[in-house]
Image (spheres, rainbow, N blue to C red):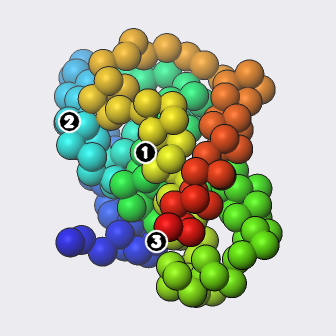
């Protein structure tokens, strides 16, 4: 099994970003859009195979846009970031820390947290990653996030809006009870 530590995932993300951008910059102006489309398609294929590095990079692409090929789409950014975290990318969990903090706080506030910590071998070093990943797995299930389906969806521009974020917040809040039940069993 690969090591998806935050540092390893960040390095792999940076290498993938540099590789793709370098490839596109090397293309002539006339070929640039085609090379960008091909590069984006390759990343999507890897992401569809549940590659958490490719999924994290797709999140980045949707957050920033990708040349003239992929528009900014905040909802897609969140979906891919959650999938990357659910598939074990600790760097993705770290990036979602602000979003995940409420749920992690609720879990830690459970009256039987001492039992949960012992039962699940949670430590100060691993609890944020373990709980963050569990939360993202549960959110991905709740929202029925599927990498293969996501790559088939039309590319549209969508800035951050509170309505989309409320859907993610609701899903996060809803799964807290399920995660507590899982951690107790």
Q: Can residue 176 be seen in this view?
A: yes
Q: Distance between the residues labelled 2 and 3?
A: 23 Å
Label 2 Cα crowd, 10 Å radius (few <14 / some 14-19 / many 20+): some
Secondary structure of the residue carrying numbered label 2: helix
Q: Earlier in the sequence, mark 1 or mark 2?
A: 2
Q: Which residue is drawn at 56% across and 69% down?
A: 184
Q: Residue 140 carries which label?
A: none
Q: Is residue 139 left or right of residue 41?
A: right
- Asked if marks 3 and 1 touch (Cβ < 8 Å), the reply is no
Label 1 Cα crowd, 10 Å radius (few <14 / some 14-19 / many 20+): many
Which residue occupies the extreme front position in the image?
185
Q: Looking at the image, is 100 positioned above or below residue 147?
A: below
Label 3 Cα crowd, 10 Å radius (few <14 / some 14-19 / many 20+): some
Q: How far apart are marks 3 and 1 (CA)?
A: 15 Å
| Residue placed most toward the observer, 107 or 160 | 107
Q: Position of residue 138 (x, y in %)?
A: 50, 47
Q: Dot 3 corresponds to which residue?
A: 6
- The number of numbered discs placed on residues in the rendered structure image is 3
Q: Dot 1 corresponds to which residue?
A: 83
- Asked if marks 2 and 3 touch (Cβ < 8 Å), the reply is no
Q: Which mark is residue 45?
A: 2
Q: Which residue is drawn at 60% across and 30% down?
A: 74
> In what quadrant of the picture does the N terminus appear?
bottom left
Q: Is residue 177 left or right of residue 140?
A: right
Q: In this view, does 130 lie to the left or right of 67?
A: right
Q: Is residue 39 left or right of residue 96?
A: left
Q: Earlier in the sequence, mark 3 or mark 1?
A: 3
Q: Position of residue 42 (x, y in %)?
A: 20, 36
| Residue placed most toward the observer, 144 or 118 | 118
């Amino acid at each position: 099994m690969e090591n998806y530590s935050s540092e390893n995932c960040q390095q792999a993300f940076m290498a993938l970003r540099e590789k793709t951008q370098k490839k596109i910059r090397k293309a002539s102006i006339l070929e640039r859009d085609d090379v960008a489309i091909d590069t984006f398609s390759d990343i999507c294929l890897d992401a569809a195979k549940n590659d958490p590095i490719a999924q994290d990079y797709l999140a980045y692409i949707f957050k920033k846009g990708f040349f003239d090929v992929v528009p900014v789409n905040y909802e897609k950014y969140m979906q891919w970031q959650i999938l990357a975290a659910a598939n074990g990318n600790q760097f993705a969990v770290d990036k979602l820390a602000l979003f995940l903090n409420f749920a992690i706080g609720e879990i830690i506030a459970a009256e039987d947290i001492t039992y949960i910590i012992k039962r699940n071998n949670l430590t100060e070093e691993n609890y944020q990653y373990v709980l963050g990943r569990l939360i993202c797995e549960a959110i991905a299930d709740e929202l029925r996030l599927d990498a293969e389906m996501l790559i088939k969806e039309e590319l549209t521009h969508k800035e951050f809006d509170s309505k989309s974020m409320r859907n993610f917040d609701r899903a996060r809040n809803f799964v807290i009870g399920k995660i507590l039940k899982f951690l107790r069993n």
